Image: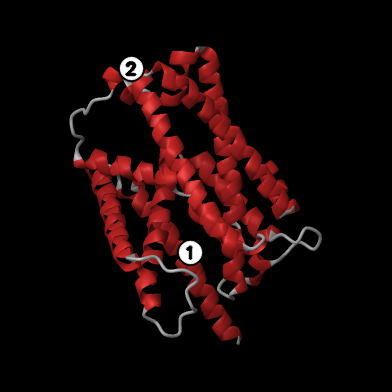
Amino acid sequence: MVALTALNITGVRQAAIASDIFSVGKLVPMLVFIAVGLFFLNPQAFHLGAPPSSGAFSQSVLLLIYAFTGFEMAAIPAGETENPRRNLPRALLIAIGVVAVVYVLVQVVCIGTLPGLGKSAKPLADAGQQFMGNAGGSLIAAGAIISIAGNLNIVLLSGSRVPFAIAEQNQLPPFFARVHRRFSTPHVAIVITAALMLVLTLKSSFVQALTISTIARLVMYAATCLALPVLRHRKTAPPMQFRVRGGTVIAIASLLLAAWLLTSNVMTDWSAGKKWWAFETVQAALAGAVGLAIYFAYRLYRGRAS
């Protein structure tokens, strides 16, 4: 985290180059895993098992959504990129397409090569070891480490721009919007974001952090979907840059999906006998409440100062 913080402070270009290196570093093991594993598939392994319980199914969908999240972060630092109106939509669609194809092929290889897949704690490494020996397991383990480092880097790159942008709109104290004199990066926002990330990384398990991250994103997605039909019918809204057919229907369907996943997660935690403060949904809600408290406190302070 310290190394990634220093890298991001020195410039957005350096952080972007590091992100590209991390992306290649995690894709190469996946592509090798897929290319070799397709020759060792067991056709008998592909059959429908017993249907899961509703709680297990919703939890799986929640984790699956996390696997496809992150695309929205490309839009956050878009103002620091070249020709974002042309390049960003193309990059988003290509990235989502590549991710979908790679994930499907990874699942095919895992199911077709690893007996007892559902009981494995490290399924990709175990599957790789199954048909490539110890080298296969080591390759996947290295790819996982690179992937996590790359994930932390891109969250730090994009996540730090959120408090920076909010402070620019006078909705957070102005020191969040300070820019480094030499590197022209929001160094204060980067350091604060990195500190919070470090605490959450050390204090949470992987699945717990993953679930909280997904819940936070679901709330953000839901707010975006809710804003779409409102802005489309608001005459004072800025002109749209592109229009998707059936956008309102898609937005409503996405809202219903988000609501189902959030309520299902609460019910799963309740059935598991967790204490209410251990619910991931509650923890995400508390984090949101803290953020709102900071926002309203600063708004009240600015009102009195003016």
> Does residue 279 lie above or below 238 as drawn?
above
Q: Is residue 267 left or right of residue 182?
A: left
Judging depth in this view, the residue of 106 and 60 nearest the camera is: 106
Q: Residue at x 60, y 62 (%)?
A: 84
Residue at the outermost bottom position:
306
Q: Is residue 12 visible?
A: yes
Which residue is depicted at the point 47% across and 22% down?
125
Relative depth, front residue between 23 and 98: 98
Of all residues shown, which one is farthest toward the right?
Answer: 182
> Along the line of sight, which residue is nearer the eye, 22 or 176?
22
Whether residue 273 appears in this view of the structure is no
Q: Which quadrant holds residue 243? A: bottom left
Say which amino acid is labelled 1.
Gly
Residue receiving disc 1: 291
Determine the secondary structure under disc 1.
helix
| Quadrant for the C terminus in the image | bottom right
* Image quarter (top left, top right, bottom left or bottom right) of the N terminus: top right
Q: Which residue is mark 2?
A: 42
Mark 2–mark 1 Cα distance, whole angstroms, equals 51 Å
